[in-house]
Image (cartoon, grey):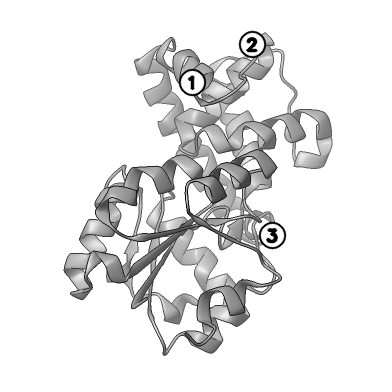
């Protein structure tokens, strides 16, 4: 492994609480009559939050959060990726586009109004910073994320590891929708052969989308997935990483 490419949300940053609150606020601005509560924190609606997190593996862009909340509000069951995809396809694309815009508008307003409170919603996962810091000189570190660059930059700075990720190695949602495109761009920018890249994500479908590139794939078991996704990852031949064994799994001598 010469280059370690990491997803951000669900791998470096535990952002579920922030995503839930922002999505719910944006949802209520679009559909004021929605039968969903107004919240200041995820703890204000613990049952809804747990249901939201359970469905996060099915999609991780802003518009996916609108679809998840719509399904929860309507009591529409989403048993897996295929049922989620069908429900997503039935939504109005214009409304999803408007929700995407409002989501980032709400996030930006919160971050500007209460930056410390906003940052406090997104803690780094335990051990991640220490492991990356210790081994930063051994591999090229990069980020491939659907999150916006400004938020990623502020969070990396607050975590004290922004120096490990130069701007040209942080590919965000504006650099393209697909993780496949992100990895191809990182390979070109760094001169790294694709088989020398290890990509770590918490979404099984993201790993599947890049596998044919020849990159190594690993599932972050601490992210937004469960035992079912982890079993499928193992059966597909992907590595399943844990926080407890992360250092030895990634950097043990060959």
Give the foreground label among 3 and 1. Answer: 1
**Is residue 148 rendered to the left or right of residue 110?**
left
Badge 2, how many Cα within 10 Å: few under 14, some, many 20+?
some
Residue name at image x 30 percent, y 71 percent: 196
Give the foreground label among 3 and 2. Answer: 2
Q: Nearer the viewer, residue 218 or 29?
A: 218
Expressed as whole percent of the image width and height from the top left, the position of residue 176 reads 27, 46
Q: CA distance from mark 3 to mark 2?
A: 32 Å
Q: CA distance from mark 2 to mark 1?
A: 14 Å
Q: Which residue is mark 3?
A: 120
Q: Residue 76, labelled with which disc?
A: 2
Q: Nearer the viewer, residue 83 or 14?
A: 83
Q: Residue 174, labelled with which disc?
A: none
Asked if disc 3 and disc 2 are in contact, CB closer than 8 Å, the reply is no
SS at circle 3: helix
Q: Residue 82, labelled with which disc?
A: 1
Q: Is residue 91 above or below residue 236?
A: above
Expressed as whole percent of the image width and height from the top left, the position of residue 209 reads 35, 43
**Is residue 34 rendered to the left or right of residue 162?**
right
Asked if disc 3 and disc 1 are in contact, CB closer than 8 Å, the reply is no
Residue name at image x 76 percent, y 28 percent: 48
Q: Is residue 119 above or below residue 26?
A: below
Residue name at image x 64 percent, y 11 percent: 76
**Is tag 3's residue or tag 2's residue first in the polypeptide sequence?**
2
Expressed as whole percent of the image width and height from the top left, the position of residue 149 reads 39, 57
Expressed as whole percent of the image width and height from the top left, the position of residue 67 reads 53, 22
């Amino acid at each position: 492994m010469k280059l370690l490419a990491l997803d951000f949300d669900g791998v470096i940053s535990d952002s579920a609480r922030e995503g839930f609150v922002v999505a719910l606020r944006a949802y209520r601005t679009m559909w004021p009559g929605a039968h969903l509560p107004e919240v200041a924190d995820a703890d204000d609606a613990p049952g809804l939050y747990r249901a939201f997190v359970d469905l996060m593996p099915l999609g991780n862009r802003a518009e996916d959060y609108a679809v998840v909340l719509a399904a929860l509000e309507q009591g529409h069951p989403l048993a897996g990726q295929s049922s989620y995809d069908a429900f997503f396809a039935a939504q109005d694309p214009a409304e999803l586009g408007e929700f995407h815009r409002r989501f980032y508008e709400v996030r930006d307003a919160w971050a500007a109004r209460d930056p410390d409170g906003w940052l406090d919603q997104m803690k780094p996962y335990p051990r991640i910073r220490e492991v990356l810091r210790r081994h930063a000189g051994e591999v090229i570190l990069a980020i491939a994320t659907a999150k916006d660059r400004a938020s990623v930059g502020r969070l990396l700075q607050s975590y004290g590891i922004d120096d490990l990720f130069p701007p040209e190695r942080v590919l965000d949602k504006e650099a393209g929708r697909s993780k496949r495109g992100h990895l191809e761009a990182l390979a070109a920018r760094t001169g790294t052969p694709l088989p020398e890249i290890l990509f770590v994500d918490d979404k099984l479908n993201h790993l599947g989308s890049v596998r044919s590139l020849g990159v190594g794939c690993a599932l972050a078991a601490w992210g937004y997935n469960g035992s079912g996704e982890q079993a499928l990852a193992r059966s597909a031949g992907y590595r399943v990483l844990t926080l407890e064994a992360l250092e030895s799994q990634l950097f043990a001598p060959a």
